[in-house]
Image (cartoon, rainbow, N blue to C red):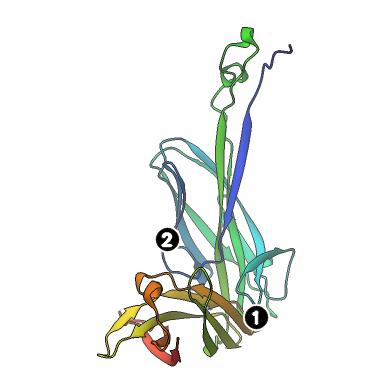
């Protein structure tokens, strides 16, 4: 029986987001956390530099490598990785540092810089900064082997490595964007009702809208049928159709004839509440 002297296996899990929400991002597994703030970087036409913070909230030392990748959106609202596309910001972006190590509890400030070409037309351009964890080798090869070699048995150290993609949007000149709901239907599935919604975007930039669906009782009271969701459309798509599960408790008790209202809202700068732009009444 051959003795296994050096055994070390790394499994890598890459979680890539085209984030539609406005919260900070975390990749988490049993106490190992990659925390990046903000969740999206927007460099407006008057800016050349933005910063973000990476925090190590785990109890072990971690090392990260940063690169820039391109992702485009499909008409199903799903992002997919591509080599390049017309509205890529990849060639304009610089950042420091490109690789860093964080001890437990430490933070690192990342400076993101943009160099706009002189002939850049108005609108927004986007790419993603990929934060990829790389192995930190703190043990010698002999220490990696555990178990009784004499018995021919060996155990393996398994480590999960994380990756996280943060959208970076570069704006140029005059930014104009609008987004509207063009259709909404309630589909009845064995697993529960689903909201099928189509959104249309116009202009030279991305846009986002907040979608909710409520059952309206005879007394006018609302019961949420799903958690509200941000639907974001990147510049490369003009229409997106999404299927959103209606999984709030009230959705399980929907009956034929119930009235449902779908609302589309937007955030207004300086105001705490969202502004309702559109609503559509449906019958279940």
* Residue 160 picture quarter: top right
Regarding residue 178, the answer to whether it shows in the image is: no
Local packing at callout 1 (Cα closer than 10 Å; few below 14, some 14-19, many 20+) is some
Counting from the top left corner in percent of width and height, residue 20 is at 50, 70
Local packing at callout 2 (Cα closer than 10 Å; few below 14, some 14-19, many 20+) is few
Assign a secondary structure to mark 2.
Answer: loop
Q: Which residue is mark 2?
A: 24
Depth check, front residue: 193 or 172: 193
Depth check, front residue: 80 or 271: 80
Label 1–label 2 contact, CB within 8 A = no
Q: How many marks?
A: 2
Q: Which residue is mark 1?
A: 237
Regarding residue 204, the answer to whether it shows in the image is: yes
Depth check, front residue: 202 or 228: 228
Residue drawn where x is 61% and y is 39% of the image = 11
Residue drawn where x is 65% and y is 80% of the image = 237
Q: Quadrant of the C terminus?
A: bottom left
From what the image shows, is residue 37 above or below residue 42?
A: above
Counting from the top left corner in percent of width and height, residue 246 is at 45, 73
- Sequence-wise, the earlier of marks 1 and 2 is 2
Q: Quadrant of the N terminus?
A: top right
From what the image shows, is residue 87 above or below residue 148?
A: below
Left-right relation of 256 to 136: left
From what the image shows, is residue 38 above or below residue 254?
A: above
Depth check, front residue: 97 or 69: 69
Counting from the top left corner in percent of width and height, residue 170 is at 57, 73
Counting from the top left corner in percent of width and height, residue 82 is at 72, 65
* Residue 38 picture quarter: bottom left
Assign a secondary structure to mark 1.
Answer: loop
Q: CA distance from mark 1 to mark 2?
A: 25 Å
Q: Which mark is residue 132?
A: none
Q: Residue furthest left?
A: 219
């Amino acid at each position: 029986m051959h003795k296994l002297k050096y055994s070390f296996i790394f499994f890598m899990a890459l979680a890539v987001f085209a984030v539609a929400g406005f919260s900070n991002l975390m990749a988490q597994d049993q106490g190992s956390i990659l925390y990046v703030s903000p969740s999206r970087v927007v460099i407006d036409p008057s800016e050349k530099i933005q910063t973000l913070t990476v925090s190590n909230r785990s109890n072990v030392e971690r090392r990260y490598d940063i690169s820039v990748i391109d992702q485009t959106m499909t008409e199903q609202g799903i992002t997919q990785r591509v080599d390049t596309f017309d509205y890529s910001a990849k060639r304009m972006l610089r950042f420091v540092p490109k690789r860093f190590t964080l001890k437990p509890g430490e933070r690192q400030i990342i400076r993101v810089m943009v160099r706009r070409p002189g002939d850049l037309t108005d609108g927004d351009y986007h790419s993603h900064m990929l934060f990829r964890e790389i192995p930190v080798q703190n043990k010698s090869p002999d220490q990696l082997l555990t178990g009784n070699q004499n018995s021919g048995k060996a155990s393996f150290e398994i480590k999960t490595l994380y990756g996280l993609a943060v959208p970076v949007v570069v704006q140029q000149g005059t930014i104009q964007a609008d987004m509207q709901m063009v259709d909404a239907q309630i589909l009845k599935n064995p697993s529960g009702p689903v909201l099928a919604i189509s959104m249309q975007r116009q202009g030279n930039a991305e846009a986002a809208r907040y979608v909710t669906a409520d059952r309206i009782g005879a007394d006018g009271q609302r019961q949420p049928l799903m958690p509200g969701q941000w639907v974001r459309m990147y510049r490369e798509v003009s229409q997106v159709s999404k299927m959103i599960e209606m999984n709030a408790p009230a959705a399980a008790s929907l009956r034929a004839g119930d009235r449902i209202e779908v609302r589309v809202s937007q955030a207004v700068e300086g105001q705490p509440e969202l502004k309702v732009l559109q609503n559509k009444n449906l019958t279940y």
